Image: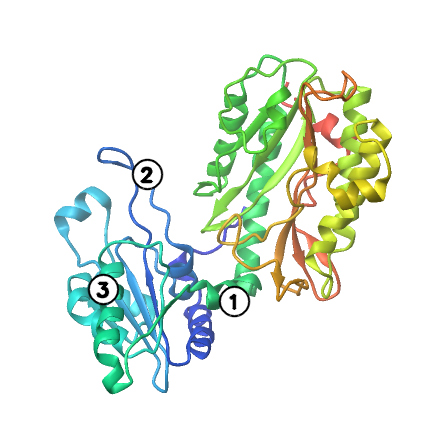
Amino acid sequence: MPLSPSPAELPAQVFARRRAEVFQALAGGVMVLPAAPVRFRSRDTEYRYRPDSELYYVCGADEPGTVAVLTGGDEPRFVLFVRDRDPDAELWAGPRMGVAAAMERLGADETYSLSQLESRLPALLQAGDRIHFRSGAKGDVYRLVQGALEHARARGARTGSGPRGVLDPGEILDELRLVKDEHEIECLRHACAVSMAGHRAAMAAVAPGVGEWVLEAEMNAAFRRAGASGPAFDTIAASGPNACVLHYVENSRTVADGDLVILDAGAEVELYNGDITRTVPVSGRFTSEQRVVYEVVEAARSAALAVVRPGVPVSDVHDAAVRVIVDGLLSMGVLAGDAEEARAGGAYRGFFPHQTSHWLGLDVHDPGDYAKAGQPRLLQSGMVLTVEPGIYIPPGTDAAPGLQGLGVRIEDDVLVTEDGCENLTAQLPTSAEDMERLVGSAR
């Protein structure tokens, strides 16, 4: 399966075009994007490094310690600070770009050693009237940003210069990232293809007596075999009552005959993510109660998918799913009363508590507002979102005994196109018959 190119091989003009859009939005401001920190699992044992999404989006930088500075105005500049080459450190952790290679690879106007950050960043910050910097970040960059604000507050009144406030970089970057370019769409296609391969492998292993952890292992192994860096998030293999826990990740139960299993997982391929959910019957056949719930969720998925097109409020996707699910819950006797009242009053939320969609991209829950000025955002060509309705009937409810403890979720990844939408995960079927066919096919 062909995979998307590595960051070094992505066309430099892709990142240059993105920076041009950032410069235009920056006006007289300065944007500071530090790399994600190295995180430790315990003591000196590190997690595998995952680059910061914003930093990568703007310039393709994927090394720890990197700091990108974009200064707006009449003469916009892209300045990089990176780690020096260090043979001793590289012996343990692999090669570093170094200053010269970083300048050539990432197309910076100026590139400096990270050791010069303390001496050079303050002047870059003073050139702007505001600083775009994520306030949750800590360390040296945070300290220097605070220092720039204090300096401007103390002396800027006399000169009319220096930054007077800090804004979230998302004010600019979230809007840009919301509509994917052709390179991002290609990466997402590959991530979805690998994600589908993982689901097929996990569904094939489903059988009574199999551990949830085995299904997780089959999923993640398939991701890696296909070239993914790994799962985009902790793989969910939730059987029986665990399927009613939305973000269940312990995967420690032994699957029992008669269970349903929710498999919610996606692969990360060159930092872009798939996110798919399928629900399968362990025995290879849905019971009559399971099938009723499944068919309602599948109908909700189809109804939600049918409204995805440019110009439609994103809230319509959720509303379409809610209409079907409320009608289904009423017909099953899980809810009682009037359908319109159940929808308006939110009575269904005890059984369908989450939204139907989230944005998808470099982050599994990609940034971007779902409403602007109090109105739902309109879908645009190039947006990518999930469609994932579900029904969860925990034990102990007033539902019929055969319905209690059932959880069903079905999720696809969808690209908004110029005249409608494209289901990027359509090759992994969703019908009840297909779920019965695919489960346990390795037996």
Q: Label 2 belongs to which residue?
A: 47
Whether 238 is drawn above or below 338: the answer is above
Q: Considering only order in the chain, which callout, 3 or 1, is on the residue closer to the N terminus?
A: 3
Residue in view at x 26 percent, y 82 percent: 157
- Viewer-nearest residue: 226 or 431: 431
Residue 6 in the image: state x and y as whole percent: 41, 55
Amino acid at the residue labelled 2: Tyr
Pointer 2 with pointer 1, Cβ within 8 A: no
Residue named by callout 3: 144
Residue bearing the label numbered 1: 176
The reply to whether discs 2 and 3 touch (Cβ–Cβ < 8 Å) is: no
- Identify which amino acid the numbered label 3 is placed on: Leu
Q: CA distance from mark 1 to mark 3?
A: 27 Å
Q: CA distance from mark 2 to mark 1?
A: 29 Å
Q: Position of residue 112 (x, y in %)?
A: 20, 68
**Which is nearer the eye, 251 or 194?**
251
Name the image quarter holding residue 351: top right
Counting from the top left corner in percent of width and height, residue 303 is at 79, 47
Q: Amino acid at mark 1?
A: Leu
